[in-house]
Image (tube, rainbow, N blue to C red):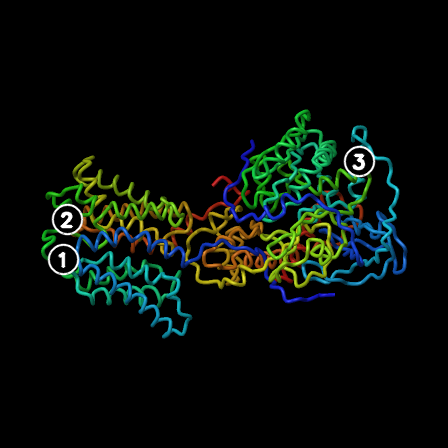
Amino acid sequence: MPKLTFVGGIHPYDGKDLSKDKPIKAVLPKGELVYPVSQHIGAPAKPIVAKGDHVITGQKIAEAGGFVSAPIYATVSGTVKSIEPRRVVTGDMVNSIIIENDGKYDEVEYPAKIESVEGLDKKEIIRRVQEAGVVGMGGAGFPTHVKLSPKEPDKIEFCIANCAECEPYLTSDYRRMLEEPEKLVLGMKAMLALFDNAKGILAVEDNKPDCIQKLSDLVKDEPRIEVYALKTKYPQGAERQIIYACTGRAINSKMLPADAGCIVDNVDTIVAIYQAVYEQKPLMHRIVTVTGDAIADPRNFIVRIGTNYGELIEEAGGFKEQPEKIVSGGPMMGFALFGTDVPTTKTASALLCFTKDEVSMMAPSACINCGRCIDACPSRLVPRRLSVYSEKFDEERFLAENGMECVECGSCSFVCPAKRQLAQVIKSMRKIQLAKARAKAAPPPKKEEAPKAEEKKEAVKTEEAKEGKEEKKDE
Amino acid sequence: MNDQMNYQVSSNPHIRDKITTQGIMLLVIISLIPATVFGIFNFGLNAAILVIVTVASAVLAEYIMCKVLKKDVTIGDCSAALTGLLLALNLPPAAPWWIGVLGAFFAIVVVKMLFGGLGQNFMNPALGGRCFLILSFTTIMTNFAVPDVYTGATPLAAVKANGAYNVLDMVIGRTSGTIGETSMIAIVIGACFLILFDVITIRIPATYIITLVIFVTIFGGHGFDPTYISGHLAGGGLMLGAFYMATDYVTSPITRKGQYVYGVVLGLLTGIFRVFGPSAEGVSYAIIISNLLVPLIENMTLPKAFGKGGENA
């Protein structure tokens, strides 16, 4: 039964007016393009080109490094300049393929486009998604073909398109839904073709009535697809929260969405599924919102993956004021950048440039026990207590009071009147605990014959590993 | 390449709500204006002097303690001023000025700062200060006569002694009592302001008051007598205590369920003290005793997590 919302959450200033009325504009990269081999959760991709090779647009340049991995494609034509570590948004140096753009955009020939997935084998649909290198483009980067291969496909009852876009300032999904809603619906039909017992839900926050209208008109003759208007609240787009809002089912950290009969993918990912399945085109573009009060002309761009962030800022008119903070992703969960010389990856949803850093202006003071963090926590935890356990490294209590159920949405830090770094310390403690749990489990190396279910578990662990790496940088 | 520019880098989230500790304290102080102004008009100049002296002493005490303990001076968060104001509103209007000074210093130095300052005290500082004064200077602290204005005992004493009391006067506040407790209307106006601005919730005050009503109905000896019950509600420190002292963040449970439990405990203790105790009053002691139970209540009422049965609450 749809609840259309969840308990907890916050209502930050959404800043979407800056860019929501700017149509998606294509950006052509000028300089070199950088393709980190890890743009997804799981094993890094393996480069299959060498320095000096000529490549064309749509050519595979790195193959998947395992089942839980994704290939990477060239998004321009040109020459492979080198393969070397480059800085990515998280601050890490990641091995990357560098391609010098020849400006010709010679492109691979794709097979003829199909209009419907009818008659297409399920395995073939998943193969096309896998081959196209589609990963979760909302930020997590989990390989989509793994998500589409649950242990028991018959038990999937809901395919949820995460159209919430609950992060402030982001308007890329909004523009996509307004400008290319057909691709979203077709992508959803490809997903539904995999799950015979599933119903498709396009879950949109009710601050986007125009999208709701448009999508509702499109699916009125689709018996298996429905549009839900969710209550606008951060983090409505968090996986567990959107599943709860759409189905009334609640999963915890030990469960996967499939355990609640759900598959969740965000707008850009489903559009990528569409391109992979119907057009057999690899994932080469994504929509990036470039916005913030330091940007002269906030915009939504369709960007070739690998394009330098600095070029996107130039395309948006450059800085009208010197920014103090630059964030890749949303303001709640994005990464603060040291500099703008980093490439656009599959998971980069936005580039935010702020003239003021609210956080560094506010010094943390003593907790007054007001309870606002409890009211805000979508995981229904007591962040005030968990943060104390984290600071004192009281592992036993941290675990006993469900510290591992935190989804790291940052709502507690946002509402704290004493400006305490609640989410930050809890996150650090979670990383340590996840690392410990992994070390304890220390799985023996698996052979390729490993059954799918095993690999799935493996994938979750790798996901955690990835997060852990990111956190170390943050500290 | 313009790598490594001087941008601010920190862990997410990168935005914060506007609300601050200072803002919350100021809202509470503003909400106390009706009760304070009414008290001064009701009782005269000495009440005004007491309010000013007590607030100033509390702020000074915190300033001195911060210096002595070599901590950052925290008077800017306005919590000391609020403690001073709440203490002043709990003093008899005819008390000498040094009572305010002494009470404020005890509240801030002993109850608050020695336990680690804001957020660390286990007992409401204003009430701690008041109880210290009641035990030390009982005559001054229980003399509610104000020359040329009020002579007799407080209406709550009349309620207890089956004497005469006028409920309307009690609701408006034209009775004897401490500076800020007499006017139910003024306090409720302030409380509505706090609820409206999301500073407090109705959970603790409502369970507290309802529990007390049930208790006095059963044990008060008057059955369900609206006049008698109204006398209990409007009399003494109940309104000030329920909306301002019991809802003190630091000394009340942080969990929702715990707040209901806390309200019930408060109602029971107040009822016991008022009905069976030697004094007519019971609110202050009920609150500071309940403060001591807060860690226990909190531990017993931790919420269930999302996905583990807590997603609905």
* Observer-nearest of B30 and A260: B30
Residue A278, numbered label? 3
Residue A212, numbered label? none
**Viewer-nearest of labels 3 and 2?**
3
Up-down relation of residue A176 to residue A390 (above or below): above
Q: How many marks?
A: 3
Q: Secondary structure at mark 2?
A: helix
Across and down, in percent, residue B44 comes to: 17, 57
Q: Quadrant of residue A340?
A: bottom right
In three-dimensional space, the C-alpha distance between marks 1 and 3, rounded to whole angstroms, equals 88 Å
* Observer-nearest of B273 and B82: B82
Q: Secondary structure at mark 1?
A: loop
Q: Residue at x 88, y 60 (%)?
A: A51
- Mark 2 and mark 1 lie on one chain; the one further toward the N terminus is 1
Q: Which amino acid, by three-letter code, is at mark 3?
A: Tyr
Tag 2 residue: B157
Across and down, in percent, residue A270 comes to: 71, 39
> Label 1: few (<14), some or many (≥20) within 10 Å?
many
In three-dimensional space, the C-alpha distance between marks 2 and 1, rounded to whole angstroms, equals 12 Å
**B46 relative position to A353: left or right:** left
> Label 3: few (<14), some or many (≥20) within 10 Å?
many
**Viewer-nearest of labels 2 and 1?**
1
Residues behind callouts 3 and 2 on a single chain: no
Tag 1 residue: B143
User: Where the N terminus of chain A falls, by quadrant?
Assistant: top right
Up-down relation of residue A375 to residue A96 (above or below): above
Q: Which amino acid, by three-letter code, is at mark 2?
A: Ala
User: Where the C terminus of chain A falls, by quadrant?
Assistant: bottom right
**Viewer-nearest of labels 1 and 3?**
3
Across and down, in percent, residue B178 comes to: 20, 54
Q: Which amino acid, by three-letter code, is at mark 1?
A: Asn
